[in-house]
């Protein structure tokens, strides 16, 4: 679905900056509690500045299908990224911010990107839970078209702290865990300085960053954006 995604864009000026730098996907955040969360009106302003050919993705966690579909229609999103946990409760019974597999079917024909996190100790299959979730979604009639491996977070973290934290994925564990059966992107602590190494280490062909190109949450740094996109394009072999 994309090769280079800059997420958490909050202004029309930053949207134009990201597109001009050469990213092919922009993420708009609708997660409660996130410092990058957009109101519907603000999201419409940002979306209007995104040129044709650049994918608009809305990021959600724990939202019902009706709310997501309303935003998709109002903003003109090309895809939805589900960022909630894979399970409703933790091992000790605590309630988690959950996006169930059935949500995919409720979203109909909307293309879906599923954010997942590695689980388990080193050398284990850290993507087993993610594959089980995807299989359940496929059985419901709408398997996500892409997965994003993001950094691990505290299981009881509120919705607004599920992404954009700057924490880095364990690249070696990701490689050892194999794939998801669908195209996969890498997120989690990617910066202009490490994105090329991350691409080489994991062999993935798509990357996603938010905090790695910011001055502050939701405020993109023009130089970092350009450096990140250039480094990623070079490592991905994009002319």
Image (cartoon, rainbow, N blue to C red):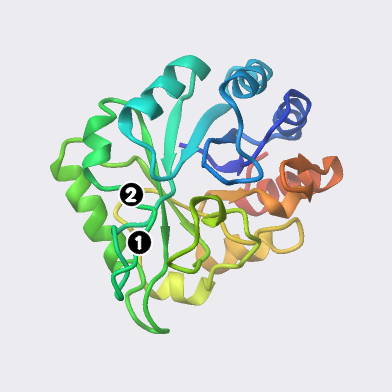
Q: Nearer the viewer, residue 117 or 202?
A: 117
For the residues bearing labels 2 and 1, Cβ distance under 8 angstroms: yes
**Distance Cα–Cα, label 2 vs label 1:** 8 Å
What secondary structure is marked by label 1? loop
Task: Work out which quarter of the rendered image holds the N terminus and state it.
Answer: top left
Residue 97, above or below 64: below
Number of numbered discs visible in the structure rendering: 2
Res 41 → quadrant: top right
On the image, numbered disc 2 is attached to which residue?
182
Disc assigned to residue 179: 1
How many residues crowd around disc 2 within 10 Å: few (fewer than 14), some, or many (20 or more)?
A: few
Residue 69, above or below 116: above
Q: Position of residue 48 (x, y in %)?
A: 64, 15
Residue 38, above or below 208: above
Q: Position of residue 122 (x, y in %)?
A: 42, 84
Q: Position of residue 66 (x, y in %)?
A: 32, 26
Residue 71, above or below 134: above
The extreme right residue here reads 223
What secondary structure is marked by label 2? loop
Left or right of residue 97: residue 75:
right
- Write the residue at 69% across / 50% down: 234
Disc assigned to residue 63: none
Task: Work out which quarter of the rendered image holds the C terminus and state it.
Answer: top right
């Amino acid at each position: 679905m994309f090769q280079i995604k800059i997420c958490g864009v909050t202004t029309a000026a930053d949207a134009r900056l990201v597109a001009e730098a050469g990213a092919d996907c922009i993420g708009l955040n609708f997660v409660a509690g996130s410092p990058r969360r957009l109101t519907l009106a603000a999201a419409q302003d940002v979306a209007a500045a995104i040129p044709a050919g650049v994918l608009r993705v809305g990021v959600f966690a724990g939202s019902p299908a009706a709310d997501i579909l309303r935003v998709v229609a109002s903003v003109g999103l090309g895809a939805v990224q589900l960022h909630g946990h894979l399970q409703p409760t933790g091992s000790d019974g605590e309630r988690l911010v959950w996006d169930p597999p059935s949500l995919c079917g409720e979203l109909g024909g909307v293309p879906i990107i599923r954010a997942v996190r590695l689980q388990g100790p080193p050398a284990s299959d850290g993507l087993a839970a993610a594959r089980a979730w995807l299989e359940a979604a496929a059985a419901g009639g709408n398997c996500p078209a892409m997965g994003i491996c993001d950094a691990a977070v505290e299981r009881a973290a509120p919705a607004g702290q599920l992404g954009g934290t700057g924490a880095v994925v364990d690249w070696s564990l990701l490689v050892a865990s194999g794939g998801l059966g669908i195209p996969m992107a890498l997120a989690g602590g990617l910066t202009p300085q490490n994105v090329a190494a991350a691409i080489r280490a994991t062999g993935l062909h798509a990357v996603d960053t938010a905090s790695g190109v910011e001055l502050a949450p939701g405020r993109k740094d023009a130089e970092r954006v350009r450096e990140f996109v250039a480094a990623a394009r070079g490592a991905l072999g994009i002319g």
